Image: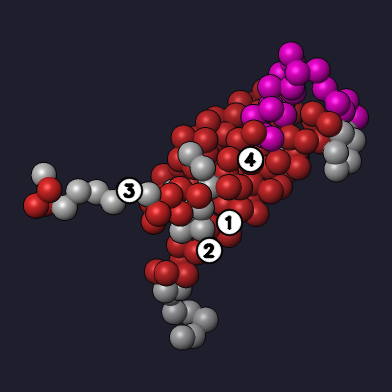
Amino acid sequence: MTLSSPVPAAWAARLRSVLRIVAAFLFVAHGTQKLFGFPAAGPNAPVPLISLLGVAGTLETGGGTLLLLGLFTRPVAFLLAGEMAVAYFLRHAPHGFWPLLNRGELPVLFCFLYLYLAAAGGGPWSLEALQGRIGPSPPSPSQK
C-alpha cells in the first residue's frame, strides 16, 4: 500500500468512527463550557438553561454524548447539523461573509461533519453497531 492508494474499506469505516468520537468529544466540551463553565469558563458561563445559549449547551452536551457513544447517530447528527447552521446564521454571518473573519469556522465545520454522519452513519465502533451484533437476529427464511 502506498500513500496514494485508497484506504481499505474496513479502515475507512473505522476511521469514520474515530472522526465521530473525536468530534463528539470536542462538541461536548463546548456544551459543558456553556452549561457548567467547564473545562474553561466562557465570558457568560454558566448560562441560564432558559436561553438560546442554554438550549445550545444542552443540545451540545446531550447530543454530543449520544454521538460519542454512537447511539441514535443519524437523527442526532442531523439535529446537531441544524443547530450549527442556526448558530452560524444567528451569531456569525451578521458579522461578515467569510467564516474566517466572522469566527464561524467551527459551526460550519461541525454542520457539514454532522451532515456527513447523518448520511453515512457512525461506523462500526458504536453502541448501535454493537447492538446489531448482539441483538436478536432476523428470522431466517424458513421461520417466516
Q: Earlier in the sequence, mark 2 or mark 4?
A: 2
Real-space CA distance between mark 4 and mark 3, rounded to the nearest whole angstrom: 28 Å
Q: Earlier in the sequence, mark 3 or mark 1?
A: 1
Q: Which residue is at a point 58% across and 40% down the rendered structure image? A: 66
Circles 4, 1 touching at the beta carbon (< 8 Å): no
Element at label 1: helix
Magenta part of the protein: which range?
43-61
Residue under pointer 3: 136
Element at label 3: loop
In the image, residue 133 above or below residue 55 = below
Give the foreground label among 4 and 1.
Answer: 4
Please say whether residue 102 is visible from this viewpoint: no
x, y (%) of residue 52?
A: 71, 18
Which circle marks residue 19 in the picture?
1
Real-space CA distance between mark 4 and mark 1, rounded to the nearest whole angstrom: 13 Å
Circles 1, 2 touching at the beta carbon (< 8 Å): yes
Q: Earlier in the sequence, mark 4 or mark 1?
A: 1
Q: Within the magenta stretch, is there residue 82?
A: no
- Give neighbour class at mark 3: few <14, some 14-19, many 20+ (Cα, 10 Å): few
Real-space CA distance between mark 2 and mark 4, rounded to the nearest whole angstrom: 18 Å
